[in-house]
Image: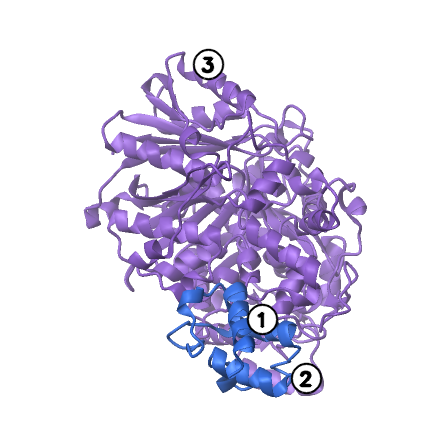
Chain colours: A purple, B blue
Amino acid sequence: MLNEKRCVITGLGLVCAIGDNTDECFEAALNGRSGIADATSFDTTDCYSHKGAEVKLSDEELAGGKYDRTTALGIKAAGEAIRDAGIDMDSEDAAGVGVLLGSCIAGAACVDRYYNEKAAGRKGDVNDLKAITASVIAGNVADYYNAGGITANIVNACAAGTLSIALAIDLIRGGKGEIFLAGGCDSFSSLAYAGFHALRALAPSDCSPFNHSDGITLGEGAGVLVVESYEHAVKRGAKIYCDVLGSGVSSDAYHITAPRPDGEGQMSVINRAIKNSGLDFTDIGYVNAHGTGTAKNDESEFLSLKTLFENNKDLYVSSTKSMTGHCLGAAGAIEAVLTVKALKEGKLPPTTGFSEDDLKVLEEKSGDINFIANKPVEKEINYAMSNSFAFGGNNASIVFAKEPKALNLACPKQSLYVTGIGTVSGEYDGDSGDYKAKLDTDTFKAYGVKSAFLRKLDRLSQLQILSGIRALEDAGITVTEENEGIIGICIGTDDGPMTEIANFQKGIIKDGIDKGSAFAFPNTVYNAAGGYLSIATGIKGYNVTIANGFQSGLQSVCAAAGAIMFGYENIMLASGTDECTDIDDEIYDDLGLRGEGKMTLGEGSVTCVIEKDSSAAERGAKRYAKIAGFSSARDTSGDRSDNTRMSEKALTEAIMNVLEEGGMKPSDISRIYGFGNGIESIDNFEKDVYKKIFGDDIEIVLVKKDYGEARAASSSLQFAMLAKDIYEGEFENGIAVSFGSSALYTAVLLTKA
Amino acid sequence: MNKEIAEQIKGMLVERLRIPADELEYDSELFGEDIGLDSIDSIEIIVGIENLFGVDLSGSGATKEDFRSIETLTAFVEAHKED
């Protein structure tokens, strides 16, 4: 029996160093034309490597020059995907199109410009400042094309592009949308260049994956796929490239930058994707490998592939990074587009750069695997896989198929409960005027966190692991070899590790691109906190970080619920985390958002344990509350050029959706845990909408009055306090609501367990 | 041991690698149980030493033993520093 929600690919968009569109890129990849050349985006004179795989088009040519380069690349690829899929974005169809984009470095080009201006004693450009966080990318791309569906930015470093496609199929199968633009985008940046340079991870010359393996060559680009339910595609008469079957997501719980040498995490994720797709290892015809070109990656990946596909004598493998460079958060999406084309056309692209001598070595190294070197292979295949492995020990894998296939998703129709809560909140600090959390080493020592580990963690990660460990403790969960693979992590953040990003950039502005800090760089990726939580606790299941404005803490609950619904995990940690440092103060001051009559910043981390009924019953777990409904909604009416606009329509829709899902009426709701943060216009807008839906007497709790605007941590706190108050018997039904950029709202309905 | 150099190295380790100063002695084993540094930290030490003293640890043939503690790093710097 086929899964009721068959997902298909109906459009492709691609821009990277080897071409300005999908056809150009695919043709170049088949012909082994590399896009690697001397980097021109910035001066690399003092570096030991000078190579890059840059896109020739300017920001103006990509998207009219109004956007940060990462977003502009996303806009370019999304536009091609929309045209290819034949979606009329001026029609009603546009309202249902969601946008899920992966990014590693987000607005790094703007970070560079902004802090260079500041270093020169000038005022930075506010437009650069508005574009530095990953939180705005998907919303800006959606607004650009009038796409009115829900948005998310997946920020799991180099696995982000693959994860966003995985999330798209989960949302479609979970009934939260019918069509998504899913992919990833990242620009070339001094930040990433200096970071990989500091780690001595850049290849001295063109990268040579699975060959000389002496490092990566950075690239830039974007890949976007239109992922759609089969019914929706057929209804609108769309051409179908292929099916997208199952996905796998896992974490290594090992090291923040290096993969496990035994390949355990990689094998676990490939295993998951094969199993979820209802396939066997012998079914796969082509694997587009992660193949970065570092010794550590290539060795462990060779080992993983040879071990798992031992009985598959007909498997073809290549890494297209030898031509596209490593495009970080876009890599998985770019490779997914190339994989879909390879499957569709029966032409498999090679890994380039092998000499005659290299080919002899390769033959020995690759064993029974047919490693495609230098020249493409023409071969009809039925199933193709694309893999991505990232910093933070994050792994993601996805399977495409020529024909539909009965999947092997558990999809248990089970109730979900909140079974644990861990919080770290700020207290008012008169000196800074912010709500700051106390983080002392003794607190961490009490939980057995060693100082050798703790010193590596930036503030965001420290906040994160503390709330995560407290949540597990509160839920009475000990991570063991038996359960490590059925517990996952989903983290929401608004600004991510902005302090680390800004300080790293300031460092290279002062000392030079060749003098970046190898110690600090790993913490500049948004998913470092989730990676450290996995390392600290030993959790090896699903692991995703979403950066999507203040509502990210609530969206993490929605994504966590999805991961359990599809049987990936029994238990998920859903967190919201944001830090508040001098860097945040400066940013919010410069944005004109902080101070008297405006926001009072806060910080913190809140982790809630979300668990399915059978697992909670088996453990005899304490149940704070039951998740009765969750929904996100957006609205593109109004001025789409203003991504800070409010929308009564979208806020109302998110609330009505959760009421419908929970089978309730507005009068059943006792209390709303709202997002008001002291800005009068926002607070009044919110109150008015609730009164219209629930009547004048609805009780509204605003947690930010007591803890400051801690962004994603606040929306998680709203959810956690709602759960606690229901548990303590204050009332039976309540809703937590928050908002993100580009008129995105998320609501979660909790009810008595 | 040149105390001045040792103190500068200690300061660098505290700043660049966020090692708590009160846990760091001149003879603490940097890559062992005491402090628990790893390969990324060693890269940072190489850059830190080069910035401070102009001594290129990787180019001057420093061995694992030279990275053992502040004492051994100090001795290596003393031996290779050009005044």
Tell me which amino acid carries mark 1: Val
Quarter of the image with the C terminus of chain A is: top left
Residue closer to the observer: A442 or A650: A442
Circles 3 and 2: CB atoms closer than 8 Å: no
Report the residue at 43% width, 27% height from top. Answer: A674
Pointer 1 residue: A317
What is the chain identity of the residue bearing mark 3? A
Question: Earlier along the polypeptide chain: callout 3 or callout 1?
Answer: 1
Is label 3 in a helix, a strand or a loop?
helix
> Alpha carbon of mark 3 to alpha carbon of mark 1: how far?
58 Å
Tag nearer the camera, 3 or 2: 2
Pointer 3 residue: A692
> Alpha carbon of mark 3 to alpha carbon of mark 2: how far?
77 Å
Q: Quadrant of residue A366?
A: bottom right
Q: Quadrant of residue A538?
A: bottom left
Q: Residues within 10 Å of mark 1 (few under 14, many from 20)?
A: many
- For the question of whether residue A337 can be seen, the reply is no
Tell me which amino acid carries mark 2: Glu
- Percent position (x, y) of residue A633? 52, 31
In the rendered image, the residue lying farthest to the left is A620
Residues at discs 2 and 1 both on one chain: no
What is the chain identity of the residue bearing mark 1? A
Is label 1 in a helix, a strand or a loop?
strand
Is label 2 in a helix, a strand or a loop?
loop
Pointer 2 residue: B82
Q: Is residue A88 left or right of residue A57?
A: left
**Does A479 sit above or below residue B39?**
above
